[in-house]
């Protein structure tokens, strides 16, 4: 993903004439300010509600796969979109909301402070806020952050600011438990933009593609409760791709997509098993930004525009082989990808001035269908058999997740954007409520079915 193309928008972009295209337009940011939260009753207190194993506690959902097990969602919505339950003004940044029944966590910037805020998920009212100073200014025409999405890990929230400050706070109160400036400690060189990866949870630790090349801290693991370093690995540069921890053939793996390519690590010790070069490499104007996708024993890497896709098979003995490679199949730039039954749904880059949603067979790289629309480079999630997609210009769509059609069924697509562009932050879903943001507003939409 090149600097000039990363998150780049074309002011004169035209709507495509096929699919479910609609003209671009900007929605007015007319939100009503939400007051501070009332005192919570005992049954609503964070301590009494279910743990963060449910809901959307991290970037791309419970397991980092952008898939929810929620059921009973609406089957369609009108051109105006689902019902808005609440709507409030927020600060800047591309960090996505994360949420459980106990609270919604948002990392955003107001003036010269980055604010980690806990909101009531049903009302949007503030429950607590913790902030720290920042002087970061993006060198280009994009947001000055923050970009990284926080993590709710049981009773702890972990967040990373634009300048490499890591914070661990108490989920119930917002009280700071620890803080570290890892960029300063480990001599991490400044990147093109704000720190963009998000913490990957693994038991009692987080794993992060830090990019501390000079200190063999390309990837780092921190203790959740104390922030202390568990291990460091590689001399690789930073990426915006969040690592993935999984178990294959009875062995635990950490797959980290760094600036140089895919590193396979032991998540307990940080020992490197093997490395596969892929992606942007040493290009100073580019960054790898799509997290690895794993289905069964297949692993998909995506980088765009240019490198495209690399699909690997992981064997029981720990070795790997290339299954297929394609420079144009699904060359996502920064968008998440969703896999169901071996079929991947994701957005291509804008190398040809447009971007489309693609359904790809992970087993062989074949394209099942292509759906061009006003979503352009969107992000989304899968729930109740439906793809819920937020386009980069603020449109919301619902598609049936099926590879067995010539074109997807579209039971919902907003005529006008729900949020003004750009909308680069991934959506979140918890208890039938969908949360969307841009750099001005946070929306809560009702996706629950209600009795007639």
Image (cartoon, rainbow, N blue to C red):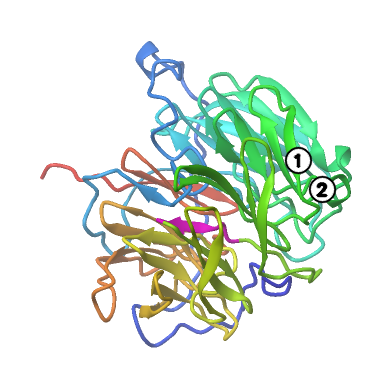
Q: Position of residue 288 (x, y in %)?
A: 66, 63
Q: Relative to 93, does residue 45 appear above or below in the rendering? A: above
The quarter in which the C terminus is drawn is top left
Q: Relative to 113, does residue 24 appear above or below in the rendering? A: below
Q: Position of residue 171 (x, y in %)?
A: 55, 24
Residue at horizontal 73 percent and vertical 70 percent from the top: 3
Residue at horizontal 28 percent and vertical 72 percent from the top: 403
Give yes or no for contact between labels 2 and 1 (Cβ–Cβ under 8 Å): yes
Q: Which residue is mark 1?
A: 232
Q: Which residue is mark 2?
A: 212
Within-10-Å neighbours for mark 1: few <14, some 14–19, many 20+: many
Q: Earlier in the sequence, mark 2 or mark 1?
A: 2
Instruction: Report if residue 418 is visible in the image.
Output: no
Q: Which residues are magenta?
A: 290-296
| Label at residue 348 | none
- Displayed quadrant of residue 395: bottom left
Residue at horizontal 39 percent and vertical 79 percent from the top: 366
Q: CA distance from mark 2 to mark 1?
A: 9 Å
Q: Position of residue 144 (x, y in %)?
A: 74, 53
Q: Residue furthest left?
A: 452
Near-viewer residue (169 or 17):
169
Residue at horizontal 77 percent and vertical 42 percent from the top: 164
Q: How many marks?
A: 2
Q: Residue furthest top?
A: 42
């Amino acid at each position: 993903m090149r600097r000039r193309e990363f998150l780049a928008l074309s002011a004169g972009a035209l709507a495509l004439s096929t699919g479910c295209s609609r003209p671009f337009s900007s929605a007015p940011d007319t939100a009503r300010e939400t007051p501070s939260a009332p005192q919570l009753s005992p049954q609503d207190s964070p301590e009494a509600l279910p743990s963060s194993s449910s809901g959307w506690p991290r970037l791309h959902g419970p397991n980092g796969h952008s898939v929810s097990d929620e059921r009973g969602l609406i089957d369609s919505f009108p051109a105006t979109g689902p019902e808005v339950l609440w709507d409030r003004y927020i600060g800047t940044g591309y960090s996505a909301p994360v949420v459980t029944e106990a609270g919604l966590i948002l990392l955003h910037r107001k003036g010269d402070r980055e604010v980690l805020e806990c909101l009531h998920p049903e009302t949007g009212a503030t429950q607590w806020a913790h902030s720290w100073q920042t002087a970061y200014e993006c060198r280009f025409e994009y947001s000055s952050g923050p970009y990284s999405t926080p993590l709710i890990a049981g009773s702890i929230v972990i967040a990373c600011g634009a300048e490499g400050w890591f914070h661990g706070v108490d989920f119930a109160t917002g009280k700071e438990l620890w803080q570290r400036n890892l960029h300063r400690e480990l001599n991490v060189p400044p990147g093109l933009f704000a720190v963009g990866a998000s913490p990957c949870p693994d038991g009692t630790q987080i794993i992060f593609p830090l990019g501390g090349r000079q200190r063999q801290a390309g990837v780092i693991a921190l203790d959740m409760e104390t922030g202390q370093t568990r291990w460091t690995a590689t001399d690789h540069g930073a990426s915006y791709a969040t690592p993935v921890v999984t178990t294959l053939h009875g062995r635990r793996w950490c797959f980290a997509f760094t600036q140089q390519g895919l590193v396979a690590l032991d998540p307990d010790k940080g020992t490197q098993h093997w490395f596969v070069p892929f992606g942007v490499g040493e290009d100073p104007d580019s960054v790898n930004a799509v997290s690895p996708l794993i289905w069964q024993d297949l692993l998909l890497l995506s980088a765009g525009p240019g490198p495209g896709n690399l699909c690997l098979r992981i064997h029981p003995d720990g070795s790997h082989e290339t299954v297929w490679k394609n420079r144009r199949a699904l060359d996502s730039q920064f968008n998440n990808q969703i896999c169901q039954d071996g079929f991947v749904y994701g957005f291509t880059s804008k190398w040809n001035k447009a971007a489309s949603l693609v359904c790809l067979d992970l087993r062989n790289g074949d394209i099942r269908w292509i759906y061009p629309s006003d979503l352009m480079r969107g992000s989304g999630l899968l729930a109740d058999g439906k793809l819920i997609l937020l386009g980069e210009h603020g449109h919301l769509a619902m598609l049936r997740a099926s590879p067995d059609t010539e074109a997807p069924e579209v039971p919902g697509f907003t005529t006008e954007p729900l949020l003004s562009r750009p909308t680069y932050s991934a959506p979140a879903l918890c208890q039938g409520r969908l949360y969307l943001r841009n750099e001005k507003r946070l929306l809560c939409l009702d996706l629950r079915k209600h009795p007639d």
